[in-house]
Image (cartoon, rainbow, N blue to C red):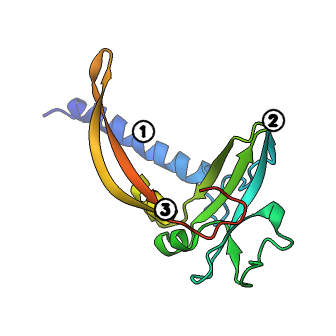
Amino acid sequence: MEAGEYRPYFVIIGLLVLTSLALATTVDVNVGDTAGIRLVLPDRVGEWRGDEIRYCLNKACQHVWLASQLTNIEVCPACGGPLGGMSYAEKQLLPPDTVILKKRYTNPLGDSLVVSIVLSGKERASIHRPQVCLVGQGREIVKSRVVEVPMEGRPPLKVMLLDLLIHPRRISGLRS
């Protein structure tokens, strides 16, 4: 073989070396333990008014409170236990570096919805199937089935339906 036949390979190897050197000397990667997002939900969204949800982490109590009902959002008024942004069950199921923030939003008509931010830590077990969240929120899955939803121009979409039982919890000011 002639030396000219290897020339394209030498050019590619040279470009790879130059690219690697450029990346190594010009790109700065900083690894830190701070979140890349703000863990704040707005107090108002249009006509919807938000109220942070706080959970008693005492296994024997497990009251759920709205921040507006509390004088200290860190201490449960019912038992004196610690309050947090996730339920006792969620705290037990999720890795310790998972952070959850929840607010209940209510409009002037009395409609309400809950918005959550779940920030996964180093372990990726915070990202999971909905069945884990539902059980962590005090629901029991009593039946599940897959149904096919017809879609125009494509095969049917398979959707899992879950029948849930909501266990009574000690809820102060919240409807479950």
Badge 2: how crowded within 10 Å, few (<14), some, or many (20+)? few
Q: Which residue in the structure is indicated by mark 3?
A: 126
- Give percent across and percent down for residue 93: 47, 71
Q: What residue type is disc 2 on?
A: Glu
Badge 1: how crowded within 10 Å, few (<14), some, or many (20+)? few
Q: Nearer the viewer, residue 115 or 17?
A: 115
Residue 47 circle label: 2
- Of tags 3 and 1, the one toward the viewer is 3
Residue at coordinates 46% horizontally, 58% vertically from top-left? 134
- Give residue 77's quadrant in the image: bottom right
> In the visual, does 18 lie left or right of 54?
left
The residues tagged by marks 1 and 2 sit, at their Cα atoms, a distance apart of: 58 Å
- Give percent across and percent down for residue 158: 29, 35
Q: The C terminus appears in which quarter of the rendering?
A: bottom right
Residue 76 circle label: none
Residue 15 circle label: 1
